[in-house]
Every structure is written in structure tokens, then in C-alpha cells.
Image: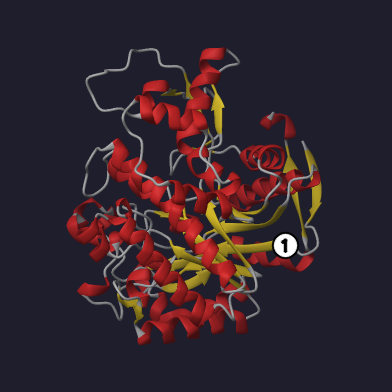
Amino acid sequence: MALKKVNLPENFILGAAASAWQTEGWTGKTEKNMNYMDGWYKAVPELWHDGIGPTVAADLYNRYKEDARLMKEVGLNAFRTSIDWSRFIKDYETGEVNEEAVQFYNDYIDEIKKNGVEPMICLEHYELPLYLFEKYGGWGSKKVVDLFVKYAEQAFKHFGHKVKYWFTFNEPIVVQTRVYLDAIRWPYEQNTAKWMQWNHNKNLANAKVVKLFKELGLEGKIGAILNPEVTYPRSSAEHDKKAAYMYDLYFNRVFMDPMLKGKYPQDLINDLKKHNCMFDYTEEELEIIKNNTIEFLGLNLYYPHRVKARSTAWNEEIPFHPARYYELFDLPGKKMNPFRGWEIYPKIIYDIGIRLKEEYNNVEWIVAESGMGVQNEAQYKNEDGQIQDDYRIEYISQHLYWTLKAIEDGSNCKGYMLWAFMDNVSPQNAFKNRYGLVEVNLEDNRNRRIKKSGNWYKEVQENRSFELEIFENEYK
């Protein structure tokens, strides 16, 4: 054990993140303004923890001025959120905007900037309009791709002069993986081919919006936020390494390669054709993807993914699923977040950072999300009622350490964004697991209070350094 002082590089971004649907609430929305997440909650509210969903969320729509001040108070120099496509656009077919929403987002962005915080805006953080999901089948439709470009054009038109960091998607693989690949979320349809079509159409939409951004000559940067599951084989044996390779191919490279290299991995194409799951595409679409790669990448990194070769035969009578190539591996003795059920292994940030350096032209990137969700945080309040979340300070310290170590070894990382700025609704878990630097007290009209970690985060920002106990051998 050793106490180590770690310094942040010059111009290193130290911020936090959230999304529109998880914070804003439904104020100002009607049945016509619902997004996919709203629709999922309305369909099965009983499956959301304590029946809480996005209806009020953190009520940011009504309290954004207070929240922007709190961003400054916890030391953020950047804040990432999203525009709710379903709120912002009045007519999804024509791209006509909702003027009230335009005013809200203008005021919100201005308030963030007024408090010395750089806004980063994502165009789609699961907020696909429910209308487009029900009418066209969501991202399974090329029509929706074109409507997304219309929406992006309006967002650039209204906010492009004040926002310098843009992202097309947050975790573009997630919704269709939960809905169509694993069928664990509404509307529960297992359809691997549809899953892959959504993947391709989002890759295409990303490239078309990047192309638009460049054509408009906007200042700033545009990229996408992916959630690569940093994958480790159980052992050095070839069968386990092959399992990890196939997992990585289907869940990481399916977006990383087209977005960063401009093409799909040939092994993926061959396997999709073999299993009759190849997506519908044109050569023109592949050319658009090839010529409009991203130059700025966000990565959401929480826990490692460990796999092994299958020990049982795959049932060929059921539809193809990438799991025919792997089984999950439960590493004995791993460090855990017992509340979320996730392994804590901060070296994933270093490992993916070095991979970007070696395999993806050392693209410029940030940790777009990293955080620790904990249940019943009220039990950790001191006599003054402040949550003493030392566990979160330890988590951030260790993940920041490995982020900076990746930079030291040549990875082109520019910042670390904590999930989350304040407690907010999570898919189905609602407020069960809290992630914020700022507490949102549901029992007290959703009032806010900075946690101990929020005070610590500001100190790190002001000192541009922090100290931690480091056990490097623990993460070899």
C-alpha cells in the first residue's frame, strides 16, 4: 500500500453526465411528445422500482437554474446531457420544432454556461419518439434515419453557435439488445435480425449526421458515445480467447469499427450471412459510413465482461444469438459493488485506452460515464444529514488513476465524466441505486443536497490533483 498524489493534466476535462429523459420529467409534454422510455414506463410501470419512472424524474425542467448552480458548486468544468428528441420536435415528419422546447433548451444551455460549465449535448440518449417507434418500427426503418438527420439539423441550427461538443448517440447498442436480442424489455420480441438492422441503421444515422455537421461548417467536435464491454477471456487457452473474440466482435466492434474505421469487420459480415442475420444495406450507405467517421469518442465504462468457451452445446433449433459462441465467466474473488451486482475493476479504462491507441489510430476520447450506484444511501448520512459516500470517492479515485495512467502511456484521453451529476431515474431501477454527487431527496419534494463526494470533486477540480491509496498489483 502507498499513498500517491496524482495530478490532472492541463486542460483535462473533469465533469459529469446525465440525460434528458432521466432528469427533466414530463412537464410541458403531451401524449404526442412521448419517447420510447416514456412508452416503456407507461406499458409496464409495475416493473419499475417502486413504480417510479420518468414522469417527474428529478424535475430538472422546472429546476434547471438551481441545478446549473449546483454543477458549479461540485466543481464541474463540463456537463453532458441530451436533448429529448420527442420534446424538441413538434412534427417528426417535417422536422418542425416545438418553440417552447427550443426556449427551454436555450435557457438551460445558457444557464450551464453562465456557471462556467461547458455543455456537451447528445442527440439521442434512448429518447427515440414513441410515434416513430410505433409507426415505423423505430431504428429498424431507414425512414427514421432520415428523420433523425432532420432533427439534428434543427438542433445544430438552434444551438450550434453555443455548444462545441456534440454526440450523435449514447450507447447505440443498448435498446435493441435489451428488446430484440435478449427480449428483457418492452415490447419483448426476440429477433436477432432486427437487432442487427437497428445496429446498422444507427451506424448509418451517425455517419449522416457527422456529414451534415461538417457540411454546415460548425465549430467544435462531433462524435458518439459507446459502451464497450471490455472483454477478458477466462484463460489463455485458444477456446476461451475465441469466445472473447466473438463477444467483442458482436458487442463492441459492431459499432467501434464502422464509426472509427469506416467499415464493418469482415468476420462479423461473414458470420451474419452464415446465420441469415445480415442487415439490409446499400453500397451507397457503406460509402457514407466509410467517409464520415468520428474523430471524438465517448466511452461509458463501468465493469469488465468476462467470458469463456461454451461448456454445453448450442441449441440449433432456436434463433441465432451471439451467445452460441460464449458463456459468461464468474471470476472467483472479484471485487464487487454488491448493490448493483457489478464487478469493480478500474483497469478497464486503461486497457480500452491502450486499445484505442494501438488499434484505432489513437482517436481523441473521454470517459463519458463512470460511476457507482448504491442503494439506501440515506443510511450513510452524518448528524448534519449529508451523505458520507466515501465508497464513491474511492471508486472515482481509482478510475481516475487508471484514466491518467492511460494518458501517461500515450492514450489520447481528454477527460473523465462521472455518472452522475445528481441522482436520477435509471431504466427500470428508477431511484433504487443512486449515482449522484448531489442527492435528490424523493421524500422532501426532490430537494437537492451535495454529498461528501461532491465536495471532494470540487477540491480535485480546484487543486487539479488528488491522493489515493493505490494497489497496482490488484489490477494486473
272 to 131, vertically: above or below: above
Q: Is residue 411 left or right of residue 381?
A: right
335 or 107, nearer to the observer = 107
Q: Is residue 115 above or below residue 344?
A: below
Left/right placement of residue 123 relative to residue 315 reads right
Residue shown at 49% from the left, 82% from the top: 158
* Left or right of residue 470: residue 171: left
Pick the residue in front: 9 or 159: 159
Whether residue 194 is situated above or below residue 100 in the rendered picture = above
Residue shown at the point (30%, 81%) measured from the top left? 28
**Observer able to see residue 302:** no
Question: Split into 4 quadrants, where in the image is the C terminus?
Answer: top right
Lateral position of residue 343 relative to residue 3, left or right: left
Disc 1, SS: helix
At which x and y percent is residue 299? 57, 50
Amino acid tagged 1: Val
Residue 233: quadrant of the picture: top right
| Residue at image point 34% right, 43% down | 280
Q: Position of residue 69 (x, y in %)?
A: 57, 80
Mark 1 sits on what residue? 460
Q: Residue at x 40, y 71 (%)?
A: 150
Using the image as rendered, state which of residue 160 and residue 435 is in the foreground: 160
Instruction: Residue 445 in the image: state x and y as whole percent.
Output: 35, 75
Q: Quadrant of residue 369?
A: bottom right
Q: Quadrant of the N terminus?
A: top right
- State the residue lying farthest toward the front: 283
Of residues 297 and 280, which is closer to you in this image?
A: 280
